[in-house]
Structure formats: C-alpha cells, structure tokens
Image: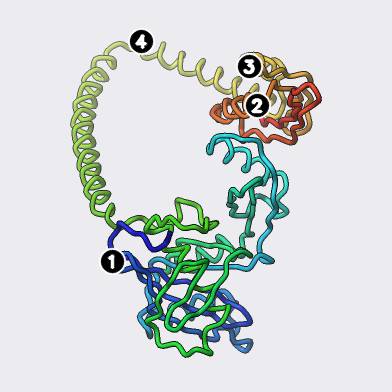
Amino acid sequence: MLGNFETDDEQALGIFSVDDVAYFVEVKCVAGKIYIDKALQKKYYDEEDEAPRLTQFVEQADLMHQVHGIAVDNVGLCYLLDAVFGYEKHFPSMKPDELSHAVHWDIELNCPFPDSNYWSAYNERKDNVWIAAIDEDHGEKVWQACKRSDINIAAITVMPQNVVFSREDNTIVMNGMTIAIKAELKDDEWNENFENALYAALAALGSSAQVNADIDFVNFVPEKYRKVDEKWLVAITEMACYFFMAVIFIFCFNLARLQIANNEIAYFDKELSAYSNIKENIVLLADKRSYVDDTNRVLSSLSKDRLSWHSVFTILGTMTMDGVFLNEVESIDNGLVRCRGEAKNYDTLVEFLQMYETNKKIFKTDPVLENFKTDENGMVNFSLLLKF
C-alpha cells in the first residue's frame, strides 16, 4: 500500500494539462503518511504568444515553482489513455528478463511511431501483458524541455480505467487508500483533472521512494533519466573524487615514463644517425609499407559494400545452439540478411536471440525478430534479420 514507508520524508509534484490549463498537485509523505500540500490550476497557453505550446507549459511550471514554492525536483506527468499507443497480448510464462526481451521485440514490430523515437513500458495483468508507448512529442521532447529549466521529470504515466477516486471531508480516497488534504481547496474546486495530477504525483513519489502500491504505475521515463536517490549523491561524489585523483596520479606517472622513453629515443636517434646505410634501409622499408597500405586501402574500398557469404556462413555456422536450426538464409539489401529457422521451444529461441545480441562486434545492429509461430509439433518457426 502507498501508506507504508520506511524512507525519509519525500515529496513529489504531479501535473496534468487539458484545454490549455495545467493542474498542479504537490504531495508529501511524512512519518509514513501521504497528504496533499498544494493543489493549484493555471492557464498556461496564450494563442497570441508566439512561443510554442510546450515552451509556454514549461515556463508556467517554472513560474509556479518561483511564486508558490512548489518543488520541481521530482515531477510526474499524466496522460489519458487516448494519448498513448497501447494493446494487450498474451505471453507464455517466462522470467522477468525474458518477458522484457519479448516485449521489446513485440513493441518494435507493432509500434506505429517512426525510427524508434518513442518511450515504452509494460504492465503485467492477470492473463495478459499491457504494452504501451508514447511518441517523442509526449516523451523525450517534454523531458528535455523541462530539464533545461531544472524541472526533473521522474515519471510519465497514464491514467488507467480501474482507478476510482472519492472525496470524504478533508481526504481523498483512491482505490481504498486515504490521502489527507492540507491544501486550501474548496469542495467544488476538486475535479477529475486534479485527480489525474494527483495520480501523476503518486507515480513520481513511487519512483523516488520505491513505494509498493496496489496500483502498478506505468512509467515511460527510462531508468537513466529518472531522479537519482539523494542519499547516494555524497557517496557518488566521493567515488568520483577518488577516481579523478587516481587518474591524475596515473597520468603523472605515465608522463614521467614517457619523458624517460623520449630521452632514450633521442639517444638512439643520435646513434642511428651514424649509420647511413641503416637509415636508407629504413626509408626503403617505409616506402614499401606505404605501398602496402595504399594497396590495402584500395582493396578495402572495393569490398566494403559487398557481402561476404563466406563470412556470413562462417559466423552462422559458429554461433549455433542445440534445439535451434536455420533452414534458409537470403540477402535483402545493404548487408541485411534474413534467416529463417525453427526452435524446439520459445525459451530456446529467446536464449538464441540473447546470444546474438551479445555479439555486437559481429553485427552492426541488434538482431530483429520479424515473427515467430508455434506449429502443431510444438516447434517455433521464426524469421530473423541480421545486419553484417
């Protein structure tokens, strides 16, 4: 439940925008209890202003921070379901890392957004997995614009259909969880837009304080973009200082060794200058080496765009696994090869793909699983794209 904490006091800001109006709800967790500290709304978009809508939105959020003191170091945004691409799909029982790989391949094949410019997330349900994605305009561009104004977006979530809100006196009840209201808010001011902002704040609070909730919040923000736990900042800073001190020491040590080596080289250069025949041989060898290098460059330029089937079959013949058989290999275009085959089961296919993904020095891009299908004998037929 969201009411049980074992961390220090936390706070988060949730934002939801609709019809040119932004709704702000700031929540705090003190001694294991959550309460609403501020609830504000403000129109942020002016058609007469030449600035883009996103710029006006970020400027309004920054202004609310300066005027009303709302915290912007742990912010959550909430979208409605119609703003995201999502679908449900059934997967066989598998480990979390295997499910993550399977969802990754599935969203790559089905997502309508171009050039993989999207953020995705998934949520395990009773029988199926709900997979969703937001485009660049709702994801990374918003995150980058906020970051430039020192607004840290820790969570971007979507309001599910099964969340129920109700208000009782000075409390908000969300799916049976009670949240106190300490903000100055009239009864008729609270509406579903504030509820969406509250849900966004709880999603951000969950990613920061590692809250366990009855609701499994979907967070589209990649892990590397989320807020770093402040209690680790000091430790990370100290480790960075020790690291840079070690780098400086190694640099100075190697610099001294380099100076000694340069002195020795200068001494041997003087010795070699007395032997003209040796110098002539060195020049001759250098000319031959230059000729060989030029020849190699010509051969490399002639063959760099050609697909070496000897290399392809050598690699495919080396990277094999029990239970996986390749039946057909064909060249498509620009070094892209399609492989068709079959695996004895889905787990074996996933393990086979993971082996290919780890060999990034062989393939120019990650292997792409085009499709897979289980036949009547239990074998999994698949099609795989490889970039050599």
Instruction: Name the amino acid type tagged 1.
Output: Ala
Please tell me whether mark 4 sits on a helix, a strand or a loop: helix
SS for tag 3? loop
Q: Which of marks 1 and 4 is nearer the N terminus?
A: 1
**As displayed, is residue 185 above or below residue 211?**
below
The answer to whether the residue labelled 3 contacts the one labelled 2, judged by CB atoms less than 8 Å apart, is no
Q: Residue 93: x, y in percent? A: 61, 35
Q: Which residue does the numbered mark 2 point to in the structure image?
A: 349
Residue denoted by label 3: 320
Which quadrant: the N terminus?
bottom left
Q: Residue sitting at 46 percent across and 67 percent down?
A: 177
- Check disc 3: other Cα within 10 Å, few if <14, some if 14-19, many if 20+: some
> Do labels 1 and 2 touch, CB within 8 Å?
no
* Above or below, 379 relative to 175: above
Residue at 19 percent across and 26 percent down: it is 260
Q: The residue under label 3 is which amino acid type?
A: Thr
How far apart marks 1 and 2 lie (CA) works out to 49 Å
Q: Which of marks 3 and 1 is in front?
A: 1
Q: Relative to 151, is 269 above or below? A: above
> Few, some or many C-alpha atoms within 10 Å of disc 2 (few <14, some 14-19, many ≥20)?
many
Disc 1 crowd rating (10 Å Cα; few below 14, some 14-19, many 20+) is some
Please say if 161 is above or below 36: above
Q: Real-space Cα distance between discs 3 and 2?
A: 11 Å
